[in-house]
Amino acid sequence: MFRTFVRSTIAVVVSAFMFAGVVQAADTTPGPDSGKQFFPIASYRVGPYAASGASIWAGRIDYYRYINEVEGGINGVPIVWQECETEWTAEKGIECYERFKRGLNGAPVSAYFPNGAPAAYALSDRAAVDKIPLVTLAYGRTEATDGRVFPYIFPVMVTFYSEASAVVNYIAEKEGGFDKLKGKKIATVYHDSAYGRETLDPLALLAEKYGFENIQIPVADPGSEQSSQWRQVREKKPDWVFLRTWGVSTPVAIKTAQRFGFPADHIIGDVWASSEEDVIPAGDAAKGYLALTPYPAGADFEIHKRLKQHIIDTGKSDLRDTKAFGSVYYNSGLVDALISVEIVRQAQAKFGNRPITGEEGQWALEHLKLDDAALDKAGFLGLVQNLQLTPADHEGGGAVRVQQWSGSNWNLVSDWVQADRQTLRPLIDAKSAAYAKEHGITPRDVGTN
């Protein structure tokens, strides 16, 4: 879903930076919806990723309808939303942001979810200028974890670095302990793009720490032919494969792995290779396949029971096919919606029960806390990990669950697997420091938080 193909994005980013300096901080023009909270949805219902996008937006819209119709809004503040089609491109992603940043009919924006790495990268500098936080859940700039350099960007919940650490921790658990990793072989078959290359540095660090052999095998976009890559896998005989593909390259990888004799139950897909859309096209070859996810599939969580009663069974769902209720992508939309609502709710605790601005949303994100009690109240216990963000830490989570494909559905096979964020942090700090130097940014003093 959220991938960066840098060559096509650089020109857009450069042109955006050329006039970023003349953009004024966004404000909200008074209007008929001034008493409401606006949640813009940068969607992609057309184009190559529309199949996954439709379920994501349905999850978001269903939750917003539930909040409005069942809970009476966020502490009495109604939600208003509107979509803007991005086609998952930087150009249209910027157009949608510019259209929405000043709100809708007087309803302000508390945070913006660009829903695509090309747009997220292109909007990086604008966020601080416009004072509108960008939330990139499970994608985007890993270095934005460092809030000292990126005060308005929030890679909430899990970064690609945390994914790399979590997969190593899960493998260690399956092998009987970290000491058992020494001498093992872990191969990463990855999409040869900025997204795919994001885990090169953390895996190199973890391989040095634990003594496993770190094998890296790139797959050129679009990844519709992978015989040479899986021939390498067969020759190198890794114990585990970490699969970091995207779109068509995921089912192709799973089917090709079977053809070359590598067992599916020793392949662990990353967050963007963990949906029904990734495994169903692979047929029987996907049975036993494992995948990481910060929003597991399933419709048995409390929030699904509430949505089924009030939204699904009453015919108010945005889903065209309710068979997708509880799918990975539907649940990812629910989690996006939860975070957007909680930003407002937690900002209201400080600023009052009214619509929240971008600056107030930024404060809320830097103090966002979701513990078991809060998740249980919202109906998301088990579906969402505990989160605690600070001005210095814009990720706040760093955990995933592992699910396994049975041939017809996903089953959870782990509790939350936590990344070793303390080990990863020096890599993140070095990357953010380099960004600050390149862009002439003086890091904020945020104390020890």
Image (spheres, rainbow, N blue to C red):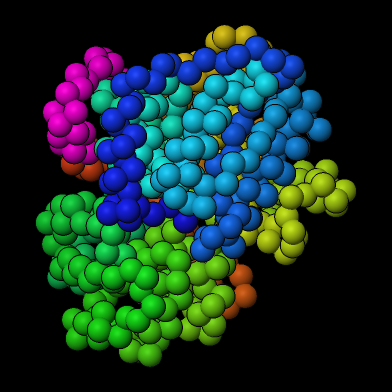
Relative placement, left or right, of 5 versus 323 is left
In front: 110, or 342?
A: 110
Q: Position of residue 167 (x, y in %)?
A: 33, 58
Query: Would residue 112 be counted in the magenta stretch?
Result: no
311 horizontally vs 250: left or right: right
Give left or right: position of 244 versus 426.
right
Name the residue at 49% across, 33% down. Answer: 97
Residue 146: percent from left, percent from top: 28, 30
Can residue 139 be seen in the rendering of this structure? no
Q: Is residue 104 visible?
A: yes
Magenta-tinted stretch:
428-449
| Nearest the eye: 54 or 214 | 54
Find residue 293 and report its horizontal and vertical position in percent.
47, 55
Q: Is residue 158 above or below residue 54?
A: above
Residue drawn at (48%, 44%), measured in percent from left and top? Answer: 92
What residue lies at 54% left-to-right and 31% top-to-bottom?
99
Q: Position of residue 154 (x, y in %)?
A: 40, 33
**Residue 432 shown in magenta:** yes
Task: Quadrant for the C terminus, please.
Answer: top left
Residue 23 position (above or below residue 312): above
Picture quarter containing residue 292?
bottom left
Lateral position of residue 400 relative to residue 197, left or right: right
Q: Residue at x 35, y 64 (%)?
A: 244
Looking at the image, which residue sits at the far right?
314
